Image: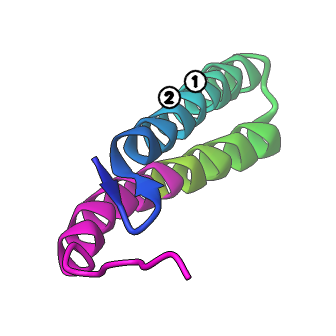
Amino acid sequence: MCTNGINTGQFEQMISQIDDHVKLERRWAHNLAHQAEDAGYATVCEKLHAAQALLDEARAALDEAKDALEDDAEAVAGVTVNLV
């Protein structure tokens, strides 16, 4: 559906694509944190777990963006654009 010049379906898919990418990077950070821990690199492990937590926050923000997209699309559905 196009709303106000934006194809909201494609827009949502792009947000999902970013989320999939972040999810993959989160998994890598998690795996590397455990490898660092196993090798005795406590500080590296701590930093990677912190990065993992930030990636979790990014994924939550992307979910909120999807919800906001639906809300915004409904709010501007009555807008019309005239060609001049």
Looking at the image, residue 44 lies above or below residue 21: below
Q: Which residues are magenta?
A: 58-84
Three-letter code for the amino acid on which mark 2 is drawn: Asp
- What x and y, as percent, mark residue 4? 39, 69
How busy is the neighbourhood of tag 2: few (under 14 within 10 Å), some, or many (20 plus)?
A: few
Q: Nearer the viewer, mark 1 or mark 2?
A: 2
Q: Which residue is found at the position 45% from the left and 47% from the top?
A: 11
- Dividing the image into 4 quarters, which one contains the C terminus? bottom right
User: Residue 49 appears at what percent x and percent y?
Assistant: 61, 43
Q: Residue at x 64, y 29 (%)?
A: 25
Residue 20 — which label? 2
In front: 22, or 33? 22
The span from disc 1 to disc 2 (Cα, nearest Å) is 6 Å
Find the residue positioned furthest to the front: 84
| Nearer to me, 27 or 83 | 83
Q: Residue at x 57, y 24 (%)?
A: 24
Q: Which residue is mark 1?
A: 24
By secondary structure, the bulk of the magenta-drawn segment is best described as helix
Nearer to me, 84 or 50: 84
Do labels 1 and 2 touch, CB within 8 Å? yes
Residue shown at the point (62%, 19%) measured from the top left: 31
Q: Secondary structure at mark 1?
A: helix
**x then y, percent, for residue 61:** 43, 61
Spot occupied by residue 18 in the image (x, y as percentages of width and height): 56, 38
Question: Quadrant of the rendered structure where residue 9 is?
Answer: top left
Quadrant position of residue 68: bottom left
Above/below status of 52 relative to 60: above
